[in-house]
Amino acid sequence: KLTPESKLSDNDIALRCVLPMLNEAVRCLDDGIIRSPRDGDIGAIFGIGFPPFLGGPFRYMDQFGLKELVEKMNEFASKYGDRYAPCDGLLTRAGEGRTFY
């Protein structure tokens, strides 16, 4: 009988799935594809099924903390590749201590 083993926590597995989406949401905002974080949250919840209890990607990032998010993304980028590297807009906001709301 085989038992799968994972060296990742359940939380890290979930983050590996969601971090690229969060990065892309920030790029969409910065490129003018969406007008506001609120539009991005509503679109993600109703359009692609982002979990409503998390409030949408931008609300989730604010609750997670942008600085902490950037640190986690850099950690994942060093382990799993550049697809996890935080985009410029996220780096700038985290460095300035800003939030989306």
Image (spheres, grey):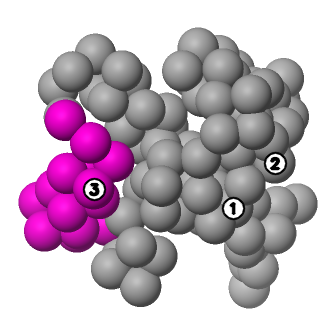
| Location of residue 2 (image quadrant) | bottom right
Q: At numbered mark 1, what does the secondary structure look like: helix, strand or loop?
A: helix
Dot 2 and dot 3 residues touching (CB under 8 Å): no
| Location of residue 85 (image quadrant) | top right
Residue topped by disc 1: 64
- Side (left or right) of 12 relative to 32: right
Q: Nearer the viewer, mark 2 or mark 3?
A: 3
Q: Compared to 40, does 92 lie above or below? A: above
Tell me which label, 2 or 3, sits earlier in the chain: 3
- Side (left or right) of 92 relative to 8: left
Mark 2 and mark 1: Cα distance apart in space? 7 Å
In this rendering, does residue 50 appear at all?
yes
Which residues make up the magenta segment? Answer: 35-50
* Quadrant showing the N terminus: bottom right
Front residue of this view, candidates 101 and 41: 101
Q: Which mark is residue 68?
A: 2
Q: Nearer the viewer, mark 1 or mark 3?
A: 3
Dot 2 and dot 1 residues touching (CB under 8 Å): yes
